[in-house]
Image (cartoon, rainbow, N blue to C red):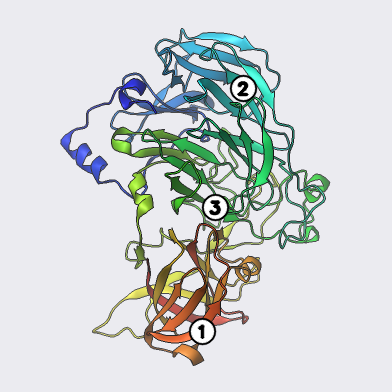
Amino acid sequence: MFPFSILCAVLALNPCDRAIYDSIMAPRVTGVPPFYALRRLTRCEDGELRHYGREFISGRVREVYVASRDCGLTWKMFLAENGDPGAMVKSPVSGDWISLFAGGFGAPLFNVRSAKGPGDTSARRVPLDVGRFTFFRLPVYLPVNRRWVVTGGHSASHPMLLLSDDDAHTWRRVDVTNVVSTAGRLVGGDLSSRWDNRCCEPTVMERKDGTLVMLVRTSFDHPYAYRSIDGGDTWEGPKEVPYFWMSNTMPTFHRLRDGRLLFFWNNCQPLPKRDPSEYPELKAREVEGRGETVFTNRDVLHCAISEDDGDTWIGCREILLNPIRDRPDFREMGNLPPRENDKSVHQEQILELEGGKVLVAAGQNSVSRRLLIFDPLWLYEKERCEDFRYGLNGLSSYLFVRSLSGGGRGWAGHCAWNRIPGAVMRREPDTNANSVRESLNLARIPDPRLVTDRQGIAWNFPTAKRGVVELDCRLEGLEFYIALGDHFITPSDEINFDRLPVVFKVAPDDVGAKRWLTVSVEWNSQTAILFADGREIARCKDVSMPQLGFSYMHLRATVERSDLDGTYFRRFWQHQ
């Protein structure tokens, strides 16, 4: 890979900023980009970081960018000058800056070249005759094959690539027409069709032997992969990648300067599609899978790291949770111009910063998209502990309101439902003058407004094939259920919960009621055992261990219709 000095200059930090920057390990949100994360994040010649986009100012939409001169710690917005080419990448071959430009979705494409980079209003723009080429990313240089690639291809289409062998002066298009489709098929526990996206939004990485791997978004539960041994001219595949969960969301590879590979994706399984007759507002095309009814798997963004070109992966950790994931006005928030109804943390773009830290732009609407920094060393951690003293930002526990389905219903929303919080912090039942504390309460409160009122919790930890998860808890009401899996499922998903590889029932009659105890699950590649205060309660043999290991603990309240008291939790702790 290329030295940092070739890519850009580095701006000096003052002592305070340096201390803050050096301390960052876990993801730290530092700003909000002014547009969807896809191809607008860039680093200028002098080291300034920019993310281009649009903002509603004085009654009209203006072209803007947010800039940082302190390694992404703080951001300030500026108006973009007319003719500013926006985000660009610097060629390691010539030192020129290059990008592609289109005035809008499906608009004519231009090849852009500059000696100065972002902000150069005199950058040269040459029309590209490559046909309709949409949803494309910034160019990526492939050092082994010594060529440039730009990936593209929107929903209900197929993967497309532009290749250049002359340092991006000219481009030729490659169409990968072999795709997979959910048309006429039901997936998993679905009772209606998913929006059939076939294969789109590709990301490409070059292995050290020159082989290219292209991962694509599909409508199935998993992404699919293509392979090329001739630098992208021809492709074989697609083949399912079962160890990543990712339906109708965008994947992204990013190669670090030291050769390690990062992968960003929504490691989520959708809530099973319901009978469309429950939603008379749906149009025929949505019922038939030619449009989306509701997205339920776009609230968590994940990252994993590989040291062997993607053969094995480490981490599989949540790097961003949707900050509005439990809002009762989820559909209504953030719909001011420019119209941005997608409220997700799906879509991402990455830059490597000084000292190996990583800057990520992620998400869509301004109320949910974020700029964040993290250190890849965080992905190597072996344990995680959560005691809720800093709030519930480290887990997900929301319930869906029976909302409108489909795209653009009423004045708000793009294929989403409103939500309310599930588990909440409550005064502990044994509080007295000597013990005053609140803890997390998982219960079941009957509420006909909801899709289901069975509360749940999803909690992520570093992926492991062997380990222990411990819960300090108090069963004040009925039983709860604990499960282990390798991906995020919606906290109230009852169908997919029961299909996870390890599921245990924790009942008062078995472990004790109205007292604090430690419930734990210990697992390896063959067996999972449930303990209560060190005493074995149940055992699961012949565990179907996911290829990468377990990375999630899922909790569910009782299957009974009501449990107002539920279970209290003081701490979650996972270790290997």
Q: Is residue 426 visible?
A: no
- Give the position of the N terminus as an image quadrant: top left
Name the residue beneath numbered marker 2.
Answer: 162
* Secondary structure category for the residue under label 3: loop
> Dot 1, how many residues are within 10 Å of its Cα: few (below 14), some (14-19), or many (20+)?
some
Res 176 → quadrant: top right
Amino acid marked by disc 2: Leu
Q: Residue at x 46, y 7 (%)?
A: 122
> Dot 3, how many residues are within 10 Å of its Cα: few (below 14), some (14-19), or many (20+)?
many
Pinpoint residue 196: horizontal percent, then vertical percent. 74, 45
The reply to whether the C-beta atoms of the residues labelled 2 and 1 are less than 8 Å apart is no
> Dot 2, how many residues are within 10 Å of its Cα: few (below 14), some (14-19), or many (20+)?
many
The circle on residue 267 is 3
- Eye-nearest disc, 3 or 1: 1
Q: Name the N-terminal-most of marks 3 and 1.
A: 3
470, above or below 77, in the image: below
C-alpha distance separating marks 2 and 1? 56 Å
